[in-house]
Amino acid sequence: MGVNSIARAVSMAPSSCFKMMKALVAQDFASMDEHSKRYSLGSGAIAVAHRALDPSQAYATVRPRLEECAQTHSIAIGLWRVLPRSRMVLIGFAEGESQMRIHMPIGQRLPIYVGAVGRAIAARMNPSSQVLKESFDKLRWQRPLSFREYAAQVEQAKRLGYGLDTGYFAPGVTTVAVAIVDTFDQVRYGLSGIMFNGQYDPKMIDRIGRQMIDLSRWAAGRLIPHPLR
């Protein structure tokens, strides 16, 4: 946009807007095309966006442990932050060594009850059947899944301590996930261990799930401040 268009959009005098844009360019928050004299976002905005995505720097705190687990099992591990309005956002992603890799974009937002991490979160939040059904009806799956099957899988997550998705959310992918809760049992984050279908047998998947439970407890002690006693 040109400076006059920006000034109109923010109800600012063009001269004042020009000074403001000049300052933003100097700090790399905006960039200006010398030929067209139009402004766009600069590279400095990236740092602001990352800070908004993960304000507590949670991923940096747990990254070494997540990478270690991902390398050990040749899987990918995602760290999700729970957002208001029943959504979650991917704030970190660790990949293990493998000839074929699974990748998800940082910043991806999803409905809170979708996938394996959604089942793990639902198991901890324990919403009423009606609330769960209303949320389920808004979800999209790659494989057909009835609410009865989904609700049974949430109950299974309650028993096991981890959620499991075998290609319903993404074809060819199995995901084992856990919720990270605070001292008031409120879900704050989620961890998802992602692998290819058939990469491991059920016994090994269960072993990874139990390690994910241990990992969530370890992460909770570092990501979530405890109330003063």
Image: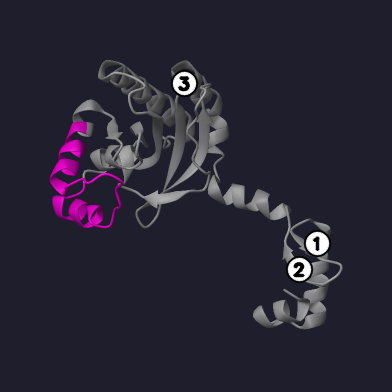
Is label 2 or label 1 in front?
Answer: 2
Which of pointers 2 and 1 lies earlier in the amino acid sequence?
1
Query: In front here: 45 or 224?
Result: 45
Kindly identify which numbered label has been placed on residue 25: 1
Depicted 208 relative to depicted 90: above or below: above
Identify the image's colour scheme: rainbow, by chain, secondary structure or one colour. one colour
Residue type indicated by callout 3: Ser
Name the dominant secondary structure of the magenta segment. helix
C-alpha distance separating marks 1 and 3: 43 Å
Circle 3 sits on which residue? 74
C-alpha distance separating marks 2 and 1: 9 Å
- Find numbered disc 1 in the image and state the secondary structure of the residue it sits on: helix
- Find numbered disc 3 in the image and state the secondary structure of the residue it sits on: loop
Circle 2 sits on which residue? 39
* Residue range corresponding to the magenta coloring: 127-156
Is label 1 or label 3 in front?
Answer: 3
C-alpha distance separating marks 2 and 3: 44 Å
Is label 2 or label 3 in front?
Answer: 3
Q: Are marks 2 and 3 in contact (CB under 8 Å)?
A: no
Q: Quarter-wise, where is residue 21 in the image?
A: bottom right
Which of pointers 2 and 3 lies earlier in the amino acid sequence?
2
